Image (spheres, rainbow, N blue to C red):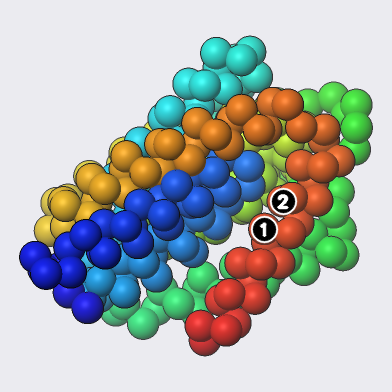
Amino acid sequence: MTLGAPELPLQLAILTAAGVAAGFLNTLAGGGSMLTLPALMLLGLPADLANGTNRLSVVTQSSLGAYLFHREGRLATDAALSVAAPTIVGALGGALAASAAPPELLKPLLLGAMLTIATLMVARPGLVTPPEGAAPLRVRDRPFASTATLLLAGFYGGFVQAGVGLVLLLAIGGVLRHDLVRANALKLTCVFLFGLVALGVFVWAGQVVWLPAAVLAVATMIGARFGVRFAVKTRQDVLRWLVFAAVVAISIAALVRE
């Protein structure tokens, strides 16, 4: 299937449904791009163009989600810059690598990351979600572990994006001990900031197709709005299981597609 007039309504419907679901999922956990990337490739876009086209929606949904969390008083603004800075550096390197890399490299990297996070969630849930009442830490409290994981998350997000929210939760929730709601707020702030950098690289490389990019941007913002409302009203233990279920489902989907 390619973008064309006779099939355009169906194509837009597919993108819209995938975008709303992805925006909701990305706000709660991550992995929404596992829905939007296949949807873009279903329209006939190769992996490299799908990867670049997906980035506009990443920026729009994360910016809206971060703003809504801030409005609810759940964004730790004093920690945002120190947490986001390493991810921006990593994302620049990842996006530059992805813009020049063969498309077939994206799939094994994605699958490996998903399975790694799923294994961590099962074997060591405390690595991703801190216990109730744990005091959050600053980057300087754990400088090596936090900077290394944030750099890795940024590089991965710049390279392929899909599932980066789960890697960020490992750094922000597991290493820095923020609860899931505040970890998600900081995660979205990071994704917005380094997403701007990555989007710029893909625009410069000519790897953004603007019509599907715009459709996804609007749809994911709708999903993000519902996701924030759900997150701030849901108990931490329920959110923890939702994150786990999302990781397992995404990993199974990746295996099936393999």
Residue 42 as seen in the image, left or right of residue 231:
left
Rounded to the nearest angstrom, the CA distance separating label 1 from label 2 is 5 Å
Does the rendering let one see residue 159?
A: no
Does the rendering let one see residue 39?
A: yes
Which amino acid type corresponds to the residue marked 2 in the rendered image? Val
Q: Nearer the viewer, residue 90 or 208?
A: 208
Q: Residue at x 78, y 62 (%)?
A: 120
Please give the label number shown on residue 246.
Answer: 1
Q: Secondary structure at mark 1?
A: helix
Q: Residue at x 23, y 45 (%)?
A: 214
* Quadrant position of residue 192: top left
Q: Residues within 10 Å of mark 2 (few under 14, many from 20)?
A: many
Q: Residue at x 22, y 78 (%)?
A: 1
In the rendering, at what x and y percent does residue 134 appear?
A: 88, 29
Q: Which residue is mark 2?
A: 243
Mark 1 in CB contact with mark 2 (< 8 angstroms)? yes
Which amino acid type corresponds to the residue marked 1 in the rendered image? Ala
* Quadrant position of residue 125: bottom right
Decide: is 197 above or below 54.
above
Q: Secondary structure at mark 2?
A: helix
In the rendering, at what x and y percent does residue 216 appear?
A: 32, 49
Please give the label number shown on residue 36.
Answer: none
Q: Residue at x 78, y 26 (%)?
A: 136
Q: Residues within 10 Å of mark 1 (few under 14, many from 20)?
A: many
* Quadrant position of residue 219: top left
Decide: is 181 above or below 67.
below
